[in-house]
Image (cartoon, helix red, strand yellow):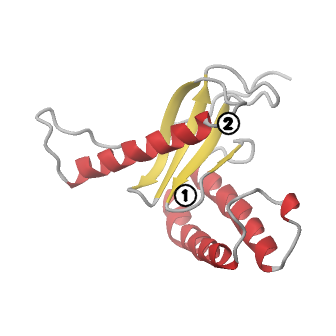
Amino acid sequence: MPPKPPLDCSSFQHIPLVTEDGSYDDLAKETVLLERMRERAESYVRAFPWAPPIKAMLLAFGASEILALYLVRFEHAIEDTGDEELWVLVGDLPAMYFVTDHAERPSLALAVYCELAENWADAVLSNGDLSQVYPVAEPTRDRANILLTTTTFIRAKIIPDLE
């Protein structure tokens, strides 16, 4: 099978740079926070033994330390899957990576995150089989309920703005 073409990043969020004199305005503060999120996302991906070297970390959507979605491009395909790109989400919620196959743009990637997180939360709350869902976090009812509240917010307030 021929490799998938890279995703189009032209609609991704652009962030301002810190000014040359090192001063901050509110937007530059956001840039610093998002840079920290990028470092978290990069560390998260690098922790997996299967991860090839990272070629680029592209911010698709970010909101301070709350949520940051990155498209990770690798220097070469992941050996077992052939994927050259993955979505990675970090923030004030469980970090997660997932393939780009059914999420060609940031709004769809956030919807995939919500679906995976909701499946996990539903399994936790119903004492279901956790081996059948994405391993999100330590399975507690409190975490599951908080995550459901968060995904409801993402679906209602963030995804529509990205579309």
Q: Which residue is mark 1?
A: 163
Q: x, y (%) of residue 63?
A: 41, 57
User: Image check: 37 left or right of 95?
Assistant: left
Q: x, y (%) of residue 137?
A: 67, 61
Q: Quadrant of residue 154?
A: bottom right
- Residue drawn at 53 percent across, 52 percent down: 90
User: Image check: 77 left or right of 10?
Assistant: right
Q: Amino acid at mark 2?
A: Phe
User: Image check: 46 left or right of 36?
Assistant: right
The correct choice, above or below, for 124 with respect to 38 in the image is below
Local packing at callout 2 (Cα closer than 10 Å; few below 14, some 14-19, many 20+) is few
Q: Which mark is residue 37?
A: none
Q: Which residue is mark 2?
A: 48
Q: Quadrant of residue 79?
A: top right
Q: x, y (%) of residue 151?
A: 61, 69
C-alpha gap between disc 2 and disc 1: 31 Å
The correct choice, above or below, for 139 with respect to 80 in the image is below
Q: x, y (%) of residue 44?
A: 58, 42
Q: Quadrant of residue 135?
A: bottom right
Q: Amino acid at mark 1?
A: Glu
- Residue drawn at 44 percent across, 52 percent down: 62
Which tag is nearer the camera, tag 2 or tag 1? Answer: 2
Query: Quadrant where the N terminus lies?
Result: top right
